[in-house]
Amino acid sequence: MTAPRFSCLIPAWNEAPRIGAVLRAVAGHPLLSEVIVIDDGSTDATAGIARDAGATVLRLPGNTGKTGALARGIAAATGSHLVLIDADLLGLRAFDITQLVAPVARGQATAALSLRGNAPGLWRLLGLDYITGERVIPRALVAGAALDRLPRFGFEVWLNRRIIAAGGPVAVVDWPGVSSPAKAAKRGGRWRGLAADAAMLGDIFATIPPQEALAQIATLRRRSLRA
């Protein structure tokens, strides 16, 4: 049986202040066969920082949104599995990557999802963040899919459909020391942050209806194993 190979994909838009720390956790990681940063039309030094860290950089001519960036990265990836990591994480360590990849590498789970330390309280109470950006999945789940038909931020809930259809357990990996910055801090103010959150929710529910979101949460919880 051929051992799985893991390609790490990091979509990034104007993440120069944060992406260096993320890349220090993944660059040269023994479980990752390649690290690909998809620079989604950044106007800052994101691409240069990623290159200096040894990542392969794919530069998009304009900002397409997370789904468009991931579509480009998926097409370029060579591994049998994908490790999807957000570019703005704080406190990420190589150990956290190991913990996320290990259940899939060992064949214990079909996919793995992170549960960050600053995930919303409801997600922590449920023991599941169903829209987390940090995942490990078989590349076959998404290869050849028409991702250009999805909204800019509809990827995670669309991917949940694929994970659920594939069957098998889903590892939920606690990352208590990892957090993501509030959108208000990144977008330059509370109202801009709220507008960004509202746009993301709009994309989620343009992809799936609210009742399906509840069904996804229930199914993923039922299949979850703690790692």
Image (cartoon, rainbow, N blue to C red):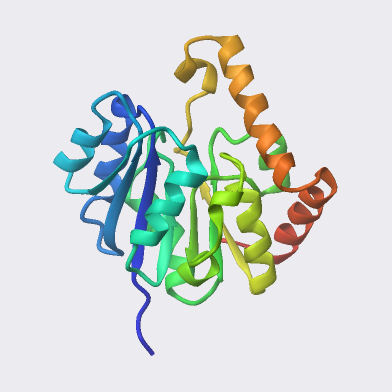
Residue drawn at the location 45% of the way across and 57% of the way down = 100
Residue drawn at the location 43% of the way across and 45% of the way down = 69
Residue reaching furthest to the right: 211
Query: Which residue is more in the foreground, 11 or 147?
Result: 147
Q: Quadrant of the N terminus?
A: bottom left
* Residue 227 in view here: no
Residue reaching furthest to the bottom: 1
Query: Which residue is more in the foreground, 49 or 181?
Result: 49
- Residue 198 spot, x, y in % from top left: 67, 25
- Residue 51 spot, x, y in % from top left: 18, 42
- Residue 65 spot, x, y in % from top left: 49, 37
Q: Quadrant of the C terminus?
A: bottom right
Query: Which residue is more in the foreground, 196 or 183?
Result: 196
19 sits to left or right of 180: left
* Residue 137 in view here: yes
- Residue 36 spot, x, y in % from top left: 30, 52
Which picture quadrant has residue 79? bottom left
* Vertical arrangement, residue 209 with respect to residue 225, above or below: above
Query: Which residue is more in the foreground, 58 or 191?
Result: 58
Residue reaching furthest to the left: 52
* Vertical arrangement, residue 45 with respect to residue 167, above or below: above
Residue drawn at the location 47% of the way across and 45% of the way down = 68
Q: How many marks?
A: 0
